[in-house]
Amino acid sequence: MDGSIKKVLVTGSSGTIGTALCEALLEKGYGVKGVDMKQNKWNKAVDAVTSIIDLRKKPRLKALNGQYDLIVHLAANARVYDLVKKPEMAKDNIIMMWNVLEFARKNHVPRILFSSSREVYGNTEKFTHAEDEARMENCESPYTASKIAGEALMHAYRHCYNMRAVIMRFSNVYGKYDESNRVVPLFYRLCKEGNGLKVFGKDKMLDFTYISDCVAGVMQIIGNFEKVNGEVINLAYGQGTTILEVAQMIQKEMNVSTPIKVTNNRTGEVVKYVADITKAKQVLNFNPQVPIAEGIKRSIEWYKTNI
């Protein structure tokens, strides 16, 4: 544990990553405060430290009394295609980012850790990307724009206000505490109900990151924050899997054979992405442990008793 970080404020604490991260922080002895728009239904201890606050409304943040050594900003509208249909949700992400940074500045919170996305790399001729390969002109969607804007604000506050800041880029985090319409829990529900699956893009290939690997990476950043201050870090498994393969794995694990319909890629979504996690390995000794087949198995076991 970094001795200078004792109390952590986690936004989006009732979400998939937020819940698992708060659990890990509490287990390691950190003081934790969570913020979300809804109660945490998964863990009573996390719910007990969670305040219900709409981060889009700046005055509401005044309720967060106390001093914090670090903010982990996870809260966001995070479904890419939802923001294609409702781009105003991207504006919400930008407003929340700005409000959180202003809260940090005015309350002298010295460090902030921001969850960005693989979407910032866009669709290019290559599909394995290192951290220095994000380009604004490759922005594919309003969601992507909101994450690029968040990264820009992070850099601005770091330079202007001497705030220590780290940006982490996630990719398809899945596993327990997720009952959303993301692909893994969605396909599980459809298979359980005996319905067919729809895959958007025959060759669409993404880097799926099991929740425990994601949280392990975040914890390593927190424990080595001064070492990685100012860095952008990919946190993912480091291998690509097609959505079609994911669908087939879930069917196999559930012993069902519902039809799979393959259709065109959807507007605004990255089609092929694998994270280059060399920096995370070298700087943080990050070593993801759960390949997609094992992660699917663990996810389904959890879904069976929780969804």
Image: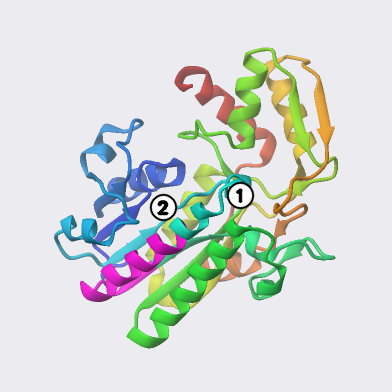
Identify the amino acid type marked 2: Ala
Disc ID at residue 206: none
Query: Residue at the spot x=73%, y=21% of the render?
Result: 251
Query: Residue at the spot x=74%, y=30% of the render?
Result: 247
Decide if residue 135 is on the left or right side of residue 162: right
Q: Closest to the observer: 264 or 209? A: 264
The verdict on residue 263 being magenta is: no
Q: Closest to the observer: 227 or 206? A: 206
Tag 1 secondary structure = helix
Query: Residue at the spot x=77%, y=47% of the render?
Result: 205
Along the polypeptide, which appears first: circle 2 or circle 1?
Answer: 2
Q: Which residue is mark 2?
A: 75
Q: Check the image and report above or below for 294 versus 109.
A: above
Where does residue 54 sit, x and y in percent of width and height? 31, 50
Marks 2/1 in contact by CB < 8 Å: the verdict is no
Where does residue 188 sit, x and y in percent of width and height? 62, 24
Q: Check the image and report above or below for 22 versus 134.
A: above
Check disc 1: other Cα within 10 Å, few if <14, some if 14-19, many if 20+.
many
Decide if residue 250 is on the left or right side of residue 170: right
Q: Which residue is mark 1?
A: 80
User: Which of the 4 image quarters holds residue 210?
Assistant: top right
Query: Residue at the spot x=45%, y=74% of the render?
Result: 153
Q: How many angstroms separate mark 2 from mark 1 (CA)?
A: 14 Å
Q: Which residues are magenta?
A: 93-112
